[in-house]
Image (cartoon, grey):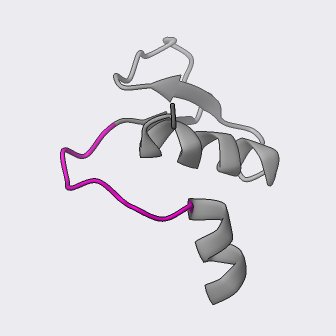
Amino acid sequence: MTPPMYMRLKDLFVAEGLTAGFKVQWRQWRDTGKDTDQFIVFRPSGGTDITFDLRRRLVCDG
């Protein structure tokens, strides 16, 4: 089974180092109470399904 797109996107961001220095969270933002913390929250947008592979599309188009 293919994971939801927001999970695949999170995995891609982490693998490419785009989340360095950020607290990565799922679906809902949870504040740590520290003013210096930065966050990235991955959540579903409720849009239609994407029928192609994200990594292949980024490599081909990018």
Residue 19 makes an appearance in the image: no
Is residue 9 positioned above or below 42 on the image? below
Is residue 6 positioned above or below 16 on the image? above
Residue 5 makes an appearance in the image: yes
Camera-side residue of 40 and 13: 13
**58 left or right of 25 in image:** right
Please tell me in which quadrant of the rendered image residue 50 appears.
bottom left
Q: Is residue 17 magenta?
A: no
Pick out the residue farthest to the bottom. Answer: 61
Pick out the residue farthest to the front. Answer: 1
Which residue appears at 59% of the width and 74% of the height?
57
Which residue appears at 18% of the width and 44% of the height?
46
Q: Position of residue 43 (x, y in %)?
A: 36, 35
Please tell me in which quadrant of the rendered image residue 62 appears.
bottom right
Which residue appears at 66% of the width and 40% of the height?
11
Q: Position of residue 17 (x, y in %)?
A: 81, 50
Please tell me in which quadrant of the rendered image residue 53 appears.
bottom right
Q: Is residue 47 magenta?
A: yes
Q: How many labels sit on residues?
A: 0
Query: Which residues are the magenta region?
Result: 44-53
Q: Position of residue 5 (x, y in %)?
A: 44, 46
Camera-side residue of 37 and 42: 42
**55 left or right of 16 in image:** left
Specify the principal SS of the magenta part: loop
Camera-side residue of 22 and 16: 16
Q: Position of residue 37 (x, y in %)?
A: 61, 28
